[in-house]
Amino acid sequence: MPVEIKVKIKEIIRRTYNVKSFRLETPGILEFKAGQFLSVKLKGNEQLKRYLSISSSPTETCYLEFTKKLTESDFSKTLDSLTAGDEIEVQYPFGKFVLDESFPKIAFLSGGIGITPIRSICKYAVDKNLGSDLVLLYANRSVRDVVFKEDFDAMVKSYFRLKVAHVLCETEPGFKCTVGRINAGVIKNEIPDYAHRKFYLCGPPLMVEAMKKILTEELAVTAEMVVTENFQGY
């Protein structure tokens, strides 16, 4: 059952020009699975409540973290004004977007801020040395939009079963990527054994639907091998 608690912000980390992570003080042992999400309510106001993925892993026991792309919404503006020591209300955990540890090969297709639950899952797999073979295709407009770049770079170095491939709309000198969008050709090129993998999709709803259609209709991946989250954190 989800629990609802009041917690203080421990630390705020700027990830990109328009994305921040908020680390919360933890009241004890955190009971959640990598990939799940929480609700965040600000100022005790139901109008300032959103569902956001947990971006930290259960292995990171000193805090609970969520990460948000900051927009012009009232929620984002209020969240952006908060500082360390401020108190918010959270309720967690929710969701079934969790790693199937029994399946040996996993692929993630993600775009933009949709990377947050995938960061949690990958960090958990790396810290636990699960042995899962993981591939991430991560789409963004440009390098400056890539969230958790340093985290994934470190994970790739320490866990040889993790591959991260970037897909950008705009090329960047010295940055290895595919230019364009994730399509069937890109999936075949970066994940040649795609037919033997379970896919996890997370990103803007229209992107997730498009990716699911590519997998099931163009690449003949069965629906049972595609995991998505009915999630409104955008």
Image (cartoon, helix red, strand yellow):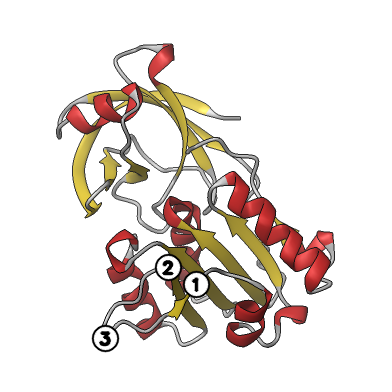
Q: Is residue 61 left or right of residue 14?
A: right
Residue 213 drawn at (x, y percent): 75, 59
Residue at figure coordinates x 29%, y 49% from the top left: 62
Q: CA distance from mark 2 to mark 3?
A: 15 Å
Q: In this rendering, is residue 88 above or below 164?
A: above
**Mark closer to the chain start, 3 or 1:** 3
Residue occupied by mark 2: 169
Residue occupied by mark 1: 180
The quadrant in which residue 212 appears is bottom right
Residue at figure coordinates x 49%, y 80% from the top left: 162
Query: Viewer-proximal residue, 119 or 180?
Result: 180
The quadrant in which residue 12 appears is top left
Numbered disc in front, either 2 or 3: 2
- Labelled disc at residue 174: 3
Dot 3 alpha-carbon crowd within 10 angstroms: few under 14, some 14 to 19, many 20 or more: few
**Callout 2–callout 1 Cβ contact below 8 Å:** yes
| Disc 1 element | loop
Query: Viewer-proximal residue, 40 or 138?
Result: 138
Residue 225 drawn at (x, y percent): 78, 64
Q: In this rendering, is residue 12 above or below 78?
A: below
Dot 2 alpha-carbon crowd within 10 angstroms: few under 14, some 14 to 19, many 20 or more: some
Residue at figure coordinates x 43%, y 55% from the top left: 112
| Three-letter code for the amino acid on which mark 2 is drawn | Cys
| Disc 2 element | loop
**Mark closer to the chain start, 2 or 3:** 2
Residue 13 in sight from this viewpoint: yes
> Which quarter of the image is occupied by the N terminus?
top right
Residue 172 drawn at (x, y percent): 29, 77
Residue at figure coordinates x 65%, y 80% from the top left: 185
Residue 117 drawn at (x, y percent): 49, 53
Dot 1 alpha-carbon crowd within 10 angstroms: few under 14, some 14 to 19, many 20 or more: some
